[in-house]
Amino acid sequence: MSKNKLLNIKDKIEGNEADLSLWNLTEVPVRELAAVSKVTVVDLSCNNITVITPEFCGLVHLVKLDLNKNQLECLPEEFGHLVHLQHLDLLGNRLKDLPVSFCRLRSLRWLDLKDNPLEPGLAKAAGDCLDERQCKQCASQVLQHMRGLHEEVEKIRQKKLQREKELEKKREAKQREREAREKEQKKREKAEEKERRRHEYNQQVAAQAAQEQSRRRQEEKRRRSGKSTEKLSVAAAPLTPARRSVLRLLLRLFLVVSLGLVAAVVSCRFTELSLQSVCSDLNLLLDQSLSWTRDQRVLIQDLIQDLILDLSASARRLIEATHQQFTANN
């Protein structure tokens, strides 16, 4: 609106009423009306208004509103904000239905919806509106009708919200299940990884133990081979001339003593000297020795076999040691 029109609007205000009818308006001068807060009655009839903007519903102080004979096809959803509205004239427009928020107009006492292409349910609630009583009845019945629609819409909205909540719960449950599966999968993978590392560790420990055991066996074998070789080497070492002389002397002494003993035994056993006391003691000693020898024959045989086995093993070790030395030298 221009400044001149704003002045004209003020000129059209008388007390708390603003008469803007027959101005050929195509839209409501909301800003100009909002600037005059004392206006509670607005007459916008007989214009070419096609739409009521949501901003118009901010004029909550309005008590009476006349919009008859315009080109309105619908009212904004915010129309229910006009909670102080008591008188509403919508005759001769193109309205088919009303916004659900219309049920909030609890102060509405008078309503005229004649000459509008209303949907059947709303038209039945509105009635004919031919007189004051019917217009009051129209306000009551339309409010009741809109409350029913509001309840249905609210039920639908609640059902929709309930479905959305259920869907959200299902999505959350699926998400929790998926997270639980992923967590379990990660836990299982960690356990498998740990078991794999444990198996590898045990294999490494076993391999190290086997290597250590093999090393110890080789060292023990080398040590034994070294001792056997050393013993055999010492045993096989050539005798010095002094040792040879001592061994010859001991051997001659042993032979002389053995021959003397044999001669004494023969003399005491097969000659007349056997009657002598000395020979009797010697013969008794000889008989006891022979008897003990016969009794210990099995033990002597075992000792001889063990001696032979020890000698065989020593000979074998000596041969192996000699072969190893020979191989090492080559």
Image: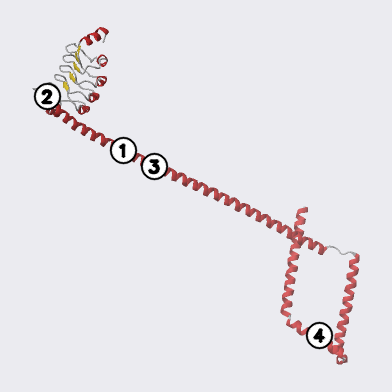
Label 3 or label 1, whichever comes before in sequence order: 1
- Cα–Cα span, label 1 and label 2: 43 Å
Name the residue: 26% across, 21% down.
58
Would you identify the image quadrant in which residue 295 lies? bottom right
Tell which of 245 and 23 is nearer to you: 23
Q: Quadrant of the N terminus?
A: top left
Lower sequence index among marks 1 and 2: 2
- Indicate the position of residue 322 as horizontal and vertical percent values: 77, 59
Whole-angstrom CA distance, mark 4 to mark 2, is 163 Å
Mark 4 or 2, which is nearer the eye? 2
Q: Circle 1 is placed at which residue position?
A: 165
Q: Give the camera-side residue of 271 and 278.
A: 278
Question: Would you place residue 50 above or below residue 283 in this image?
Answer: above
Residue at image mark 3:
176
Label 3 sits on a secondary structure element that is helix
Q: Mark 1: which amino acid? A: Lys
Please state if 275 lies on the left or on the right of 97 as rendered: right
Name the residue that disc number 4 marks. Answer: 286
The amino acid marked with disc number 3 is: Arg
Q: Is residue 191 left or right of residue 232?
A: left
- In three-dimensional space, the C-alpha distance between marks 1 and 4, rounded to whole angstroms, equals 121 Å
The residues bearing labels 3 and 4 have C-alpha atoms spaced at a distance of: 106 Å
